[in-house]
């Protein structure tokens, strides 16, 4: 089966410590701090026991979203990128489609399995 945006990659961005958070910070506090870094809001927030999938968007701009995954065990945020397609100007509808097509909920549920899809420039 061919995927609409080609191969997927998870590019490590930073840890919670990098943005000044303690490892015992609440999930809500972690996400709020992350959104403040990007001066954005979470249009979608899918929380699993080990990870969170977010669609971060610029307020009042419906095609400005990007997908991020937070690994709650390693306290790392990843940017979700695609080889063949735009990944930083998504709508809510595109996010919903990509979540299903790329099984992103399963990846948020078990972020330790991301190693096969990590960016070659930054290994976590």
Image (spheres, rainbow, N blue to C red):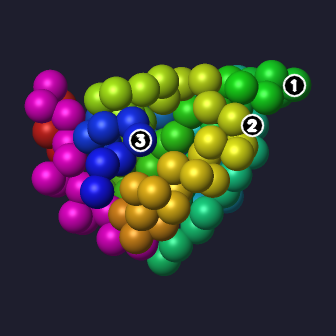
Report crowding for label 2: few under 14, some 14 to 19, many 20 or more residues within 10 A (C-alpha): some
Q: Position of residue 2 (x, y in %)?
A: 30, 48
Q: Position of residue 73 (x, y in %)?
A: 34, 65
Q: Are the residues flagged by discs 3 and 2 in contact, CB closer than 8 Å?
A: no
Residue named by callout 3? 4
Q: Earlier in the sequence, mark 1 or mark 2?
A: 2
Is 111 rendered above or below residue 117?
Answer: below
Is 60 rendered above or below residue 112?
Answer: above
Whether residue 101 is visible to the viewer of this picture, yes or no, is yes
Separation of marks 3 and 1 at Cα, in angstroms = 27 Å
Q: Main secondary structure of the magenta part?
A: helix
Q: Is residue 97 left or right of residue 105?
A: right
Q: Position of residue 56 (x, y in %)?
A: 64, 37
Residue named by callout 2? 41
Task: Check the picture and name the quadrant holding the C terminus.
Answer: top left
Is 104 a magenta residue? no
Q: Earlier in the sequence, mark 3 or mark 2?
A: 3
Report crowding for label 1: few under 14, some 14 to 19, many 20 or more residues within 10 A (C-alpha): few
Q: Is residue 98 left or right of residue 119?
A: right
Q: Which residues are magenta?
A: 108-121
Q: Quadrant of residue 90?
A: top right
Please identify the residue farthest to the bottom as the structure is shown.
49
Whether residue 26 is visible to the viewer of this picture, yes or no, is no
């Amino acid at each position: 089966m061919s995927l609409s945006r080609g191969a997927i990659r998870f590019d490590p961005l930073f840890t919670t410590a990098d943005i000044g958070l303690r490892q015992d910070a609440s999930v809500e506090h972690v996400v709020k701090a992350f959104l403040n870094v990007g001066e954005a809001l979470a249009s979608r927030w899918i929380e699993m026991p080990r990870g969170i999938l977010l669609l971060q968007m610029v307020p009042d701009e419906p095609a400005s979203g990007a997908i991020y995954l937070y690994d709650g065990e390693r306290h790392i945020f990843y940017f979700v990128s695609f080889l063949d397609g735009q990944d930083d100007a998504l709508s809510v509808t595109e996010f919903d489609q990509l979540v299903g097509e790329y099984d992103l909920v399963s990846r948020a549920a078990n972020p330790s399995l991301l190693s096969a899809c990590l960016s070659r420039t930054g290994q976590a």
